[in-house]
Image (cartoon, coloured by chain):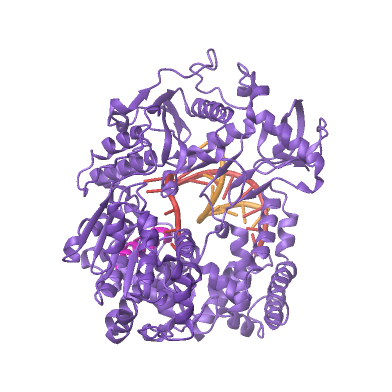
Chain colours: A purple, B red, C orange
DNA sequence: GCCGACACACTTTTT
DNA sequence: GTGTGTCGGC
């Protein structure tokens, strides 16, 4: 991307970029892009000057407004692409916005250098002016894991028992201060003593000092240092005032105080700030989001125009009616009422059903899904939205048994996996020899006999001499401070790093990466590992190398992943989505299943205990988000019994059920068709449950079975199909590469359960005695020959 | 320094 | 019930 700081001329410059930009946006110069908007949307697009708050209810075309507004500003030549600041929370949202603006205005979207997440834009600004806040422009960005390890060191350096005062807790505390825009000296005196008997602020200060020594920032700092920069250097702030003629903010209800302050500083310039959000969808209070930011927008920006988008294009009247009635129980909202013009009189009401326990819940929802599928509905249009991730399990178990394709969205992210972080640590040390945290991470992974004692020695030496650990290690291997055996392997490691560094630029970075993992013994470590997930980890490492191909160099790749910790999961398989309510925000499905509406789970007990009324209201907003994800069908479930923390508990239906309007709701009496199945079946658990009242009696007519047949037929055609793969928690049934059935006693591999031997074959269903997971019944398309 | 045994926790998650 | 992280023994 071109230098964002190349200041564009205020007016069109004949020739170069100007001409191209104008040519590119010519297609939208006409009125058609506004013509497709409703009056409120149009107002939101055309009110370009001054502060604007767009309250956009669920499904009211929020993204369309944002993207069209940008297109409009460009088309009317009010600003160049590089003069627009557009901020989102996630990389995904930023990507989507860029894509959709591109659809409207063509290639001049590439000039939008300032479209990105708060953090990405924060880094960009910070790198420009790093020296002004005591950093070098090459500063590294620490993720949560590095943060915690660093804090552990700080705590230990103080001689405090890390057991009593866990680093995690300190991290949460410091994070909350950073979210509120507080540097160590700003922390209110009463709060500073919140950790280790009055040492909270002391640790905060010490941690920040360590960060500076490491030339590093954590995520919170990216904004906090921006604030410091702007406040201490008005000339720099002024530069950005000049630059950002128009500012747009997505999901404003999710901003924390630091982000709010940042926006406010920048908006002081031209005051052309447009925030889009929905107070009813604020579900991130627990991580510092302030609904208050949106509630008091008009006070913060006097003369602000507030526009409400209430015309919903997504859901049926029943769904909107149910959701609106529910959310109306909240106090302290700005108030919107969604409505739709396109109401279908035959649309189903929101359904509420109950089940005995979570397994029956999963079974019944599985049946419902298969029934819908038989009627021709795509699995991609169905989602199960849960409150807490442990609920996903019963669905996964059930769907594996049914052979129903599903994908888990969210969950552990690719770059958070241990093997990926280890590999990245190696790369980081190669690219940045001073990256102590990365070095410490892998110095003894795989095992090299360099234990804690040695690392402590290196660390102490490094600190006393104010040098990076790697250099300290180099020095200490010249002496006899370290035992001979350890010294040899440490020397070897240092030599390896030197060698790899010499190859930087000399050989292709993907090749270098492979070499590093190979020569360090890291790959071998996992090859030797007999645990069930080792093959998956090796596969992930390969995937990591593959994903590096899109980058120029190792350094470019590392810079990218520091901020963009997500990946596209554009898998085109038809599959039911399973995810938490939180990760469902912004998505939509024809059919949405909402299981687990029980007191204590939803609303979650902890939310009630810790945040009282505010907590309850946030839970209710979560319920609102859940229901409004549905276009046509929303099916709510609650179980009478649920196992929580290993104990069976009988449950009380969620209070939210009573808050739904009867007019829009159908209560289904009893859906269980498993008479005699395990009634009162507490304690009856284990593989034998599959044998009761054969839930598979009708299996051979189910889509799952037919799908398995089809998979097998396809597999026979193309042998290269390969193993089942786990991609970003996504379980995709692939064929086995052979039409022939498995044999009893045969060794197989299952992505979730690992290796095992077949003990029983029944059509396409295998009973496998897994080495780690015990006996499970699985569909053969989910295993590969081991 | 390494491996096995016990304790502990266990809502939500992005950057 | 299950996974993770720390302590103690070898």
Q: Is residue A23 left or right of residue A665?
A: right
The answer to whether residue A207 of the structure is visible from this angle is: no
The answer to whether residue A631 of the structure is visible from this angle is: yes
Q: Nearer the viewer, residue A326 or A696?
A: A326
Instruction: State the image coordinates of residue A368 (x, y, percent, origin top left).
Output: 52, 27
Find residue A241 and report its image quarter. bottom left
Quadrant including the C terminus of chain A: top right
State whether the magenta stretch is mostly helix, strand or loop: helix
Please tell me which residue is depicted at 42% across the width and 83% down the height of the picture.
A5
Instruction: State the image coordinates of residue A460 (x, y, percent, origin top left).
Output: 52, 78
Instruction: State the image coordinates of residue A370 (x, y, percent, origin top left).
Output: 57, 28
Q: Which residues are magenta?
A: A165-181
Q: Nearer the viewer, residue A251 or A360?
A: A251
Q: Is residue A470 left or right of residue A224?
A: right
Q: Nearer the viewer, residue A716 or A748?
A: A716
Residue furthest front as drawn: A30
Find residue A203 and report its image quarter. bottom left
Q: Nearer the viewer, residue A663 or A266?
A: A663
Please tell me which residue is depicted at 64% across the width and 19% down the height of the picture.
A698
Q: Is residue A786 left or right of residue A42?
A: right
Residue A169 covered by magenta stretch: yes
Find residue A250 and report its image quarter. bottom left
Q: Is residue A228 left or right of residue A222?
A: left
Instruction: State the image coordinates of residue A7 (x, y, percent, origin top left).
Output: 40, 85
Residue furthest top as drawn: A676
- Image height check: is A260 above or below A320? below
Residue A599 covered by magenta stretch: no
């Amino acid at each position: 991307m071109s230098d964002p700081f190349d200041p564009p001329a205020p007016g069109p410059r004949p020739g170069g970029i100007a001409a191209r930009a104008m040519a590119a946006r010519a297609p939208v110069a006409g009125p058609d892009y506004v013509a497709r908007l409703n009056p409120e949307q149009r107002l939101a697009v055309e009110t370009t000057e001054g502060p604007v708050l767009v309250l956009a209810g669920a499904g009211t075309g929020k993204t369309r407004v944002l993207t069209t507004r940008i297109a409009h500003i460009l088309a009317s030549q009010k600003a160049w692409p590089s003069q627009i600041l557009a901020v989102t929370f996630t990389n995904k949202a930023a990507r989507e916005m860029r894509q959709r603006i591109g659809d409207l205005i063509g290639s001049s979207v590439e000039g939008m250098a300032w479209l990105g997440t708060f953090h990405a834009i924060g880094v960009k600004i910070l790198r420009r002016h790093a020296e002004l806040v005591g950093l070098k422009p090459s500063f590294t960005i620490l993720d949560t894991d590095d943060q915690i390890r660093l804090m552990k060191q700080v705590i230990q350096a103080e001689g405090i028992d890390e057991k009593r005062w866990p680093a995690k807790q300190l991290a949460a505390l410091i994070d909350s201060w950073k979210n509120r825009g507080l540097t160590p000296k700003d922390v209110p005196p009463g709060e500073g003593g919140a950790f280790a008997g009055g040492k909270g602020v002391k640790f905060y200060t010490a941690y920040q000092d360590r960060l500076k020594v490491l030339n590093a920032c954590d995520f919170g700092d990216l904004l906090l240092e921006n604030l410091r920069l702007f406040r201490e250097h008005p000339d720099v702030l002024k530069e950005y005032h000049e630059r950002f003629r128009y500012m747009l903010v997505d999901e404003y209800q999710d901003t924390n105080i630091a982000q709010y302050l940042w926006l406010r500083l920048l908006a002081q310039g031209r005051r052309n700030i447009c925030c889009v959000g929905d107070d009813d969808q604020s579900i991130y209070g627990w991580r510092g989001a302030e609904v208050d930011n949106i509630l008091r927008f008009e006070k913060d920006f006097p003369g602000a125009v507030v526009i409400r988008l209430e015309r919903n294009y997504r859901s049926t009247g029943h769904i909107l009616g149910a959701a609106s009635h529910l959310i109306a129980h909240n106090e302290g909202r700005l108030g919107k009422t969604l409505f739709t013009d396109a109401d279908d009189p035959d649309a189903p009401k929101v359904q509420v059903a109950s089940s005995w326990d979570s397994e029956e819940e999963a079974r019944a929802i599985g049946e419902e899904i298969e029934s819908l599928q038989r009627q021709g509905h795509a699995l991609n249009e169905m989602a199960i939205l849960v409150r807490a991730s442990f609920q996903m399990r019963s669905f996964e178990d059930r769907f594996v048994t049914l052979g129903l394709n599903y994908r888990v969205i969210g969950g552990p992210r690719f770059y958070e996996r241990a093997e990926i972080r280890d590999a990245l640590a190696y790369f980081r040390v190669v690219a940045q020899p001073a990256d102590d945290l990365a070095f410490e991470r892998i110095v003894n992974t795989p095992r090299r006999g360099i234990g804690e004692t040695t690392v402590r020695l290196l660390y102490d030496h490094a600190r006393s001499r104010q040098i990076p650990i790697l250099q300290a290690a180099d020095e200490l291997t010249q002496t006899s401070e370290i035992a001979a055996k350890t010294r040899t392997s440490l020397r070897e490691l240092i030599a390896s790093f030197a060698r790899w560094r010499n190859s930087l630029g000399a050989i292709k970075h993907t090749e270098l990466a492979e070499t590093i993992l190979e020569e360090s013994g890291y790959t071998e470590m996992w090859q030797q590992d007999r645990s069930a997930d080792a093959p998956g980890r090796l596969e992930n490492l390969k995937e990591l190398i593959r994903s590096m191909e899109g980058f120029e160099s190792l350094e470019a790749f590392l810079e990218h992943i520091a901020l963009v910790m997500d990946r596209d999961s554009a898998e085109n398989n038809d599959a039911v989505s399973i995810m938490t309510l939180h990760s469902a925000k912004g998505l939509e499905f024809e059919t949405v299943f909402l299981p687990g509406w029980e007191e204590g789970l939803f609303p979650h007990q902890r939310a009630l205990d810790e945040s009282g009324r505010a907590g309850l209201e946030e839970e209710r907003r979560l319920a609102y988000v859940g229901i409004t994800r549905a276009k046509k069908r929303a099916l709510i479930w609650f179980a009478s019994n649920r196992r929580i923390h290993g104990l069976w508990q009988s449950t009380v239906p969620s209070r939210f059920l009573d808050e739904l309007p009867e007019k829009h709701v159908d209560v289904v009496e009893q859906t269980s068709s498993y008479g005699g199945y395990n009634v009162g079946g507490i304690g009856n658990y284990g593989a034998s449950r599959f044998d009761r009242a054969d839930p598979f009696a009708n299996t051979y007519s189910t889509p799952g079975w037919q799908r398995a047949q089809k998979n097998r037929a396809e597999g026979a055609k193309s042998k290269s199909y390969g193993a089942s793969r786990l991609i970003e928690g996504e379980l995709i049934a692939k064929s086995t590469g052979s039409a022939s059935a498995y044999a009893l006693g045969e060794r197989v591999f299952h992505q979730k359960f690992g290796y095992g031997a077949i003990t029983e074959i029944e059509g396409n269903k295998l009973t496998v005695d897994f080495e780690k997971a015990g006996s499970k019944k699985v569909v053969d398309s989910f295993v590969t020959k081991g």
